[in-house]
Amino acid sequence: MSTRINPVAPGSKPELAAIEKKILEERGRISPLYQTLLNAPEIAQGWEALLTAIRNRNSLSPAIREMIILRVAILNRAAYEFDAHEPHALKAGVSPEKIAALRELDLPAIFNEQEALILNLTDVMTKEIQVPDQLFDRIKPLFNDKERLELVATISAYNMVSRLLNALHVGH
């Protein structure tokens, strides 16, 4: 499957130097995703700022965040996203058994109560879009307003990532 938008080779356009520098500082490399986004510098810049805030500057534990990202990738059939985040999940302390379990459509009982609830929210937001009050009411006592926003923003943002990757055939 070929990519639907030609990637911009890093360093090929001097006018992109500042945004490329920022991406390199935050990510350590300019991935195929960002090479694609560089076709629209304003979008690349906004994307980088949003995803950096969600991934690197929120109060969620790295393990929770990476489980959300992996689950969204599975539900949206975004193999590139899953493969890119699996090492981050392992580094964050997510066990190989839990990573394998995230691949199952029906989640096994390997997750603790809080993880299972977050993954349920992830599934509902990704597959059904609308979140029933009954589910959100179970989340409220476990997280403050900031944390609830960060959970929902993380799920939302990584749905955006996987859907762009899939639509444009970015990745493997």
Image (cartoon, helix red, strand yellow):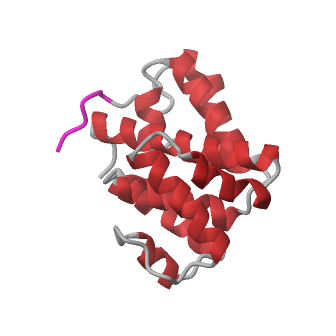
Residue 12 in percent (x, y) is at 45, 25
Magenta span of residues: 1-6
Residue 100 in percent (x, y) is at 42, 78
Location of residue 108 with respect to 84 vertically, above or below: below
Q: Taking 40 as reference, is 57 left or right?
A: right
Most distant residue in the front direction: 134
Residue pictured at 46% horizontal, 18% vertical: 40
The residue lying toward the viewer, choosing from 125 and 172, is: 125
Residue pictured at 60% horizontal, 61% vertical: 118
Q: Which secondary structure type mostly characterizes the magenta part of the structure?
A: loop
Residue 65 in the magenta stretch? The answer is no
Residue pictured at 63% horizontal, 50% vertical: 136
The residue lying toward the viewer, choosing from 69 and 150, is: 150
Residue 9 in view, yes or no:
no
Location of residue 34 with respect to 31 vertically, above or below: above
Q: Taking 98 as reference, is 118 left or right?
A: right
The residue lying toward the viewer, choosing from 60 and 112, is: 112
Residue 88 in percent (x, y) is at 58, 65
Q: Taking 112 as reference, is 34 left or right?
A: left
Location of residue 53 with respect to 101 vertically, above or below: above
Image quarter (top left, top right, bottom left or bottom right) of the N terminus: top left
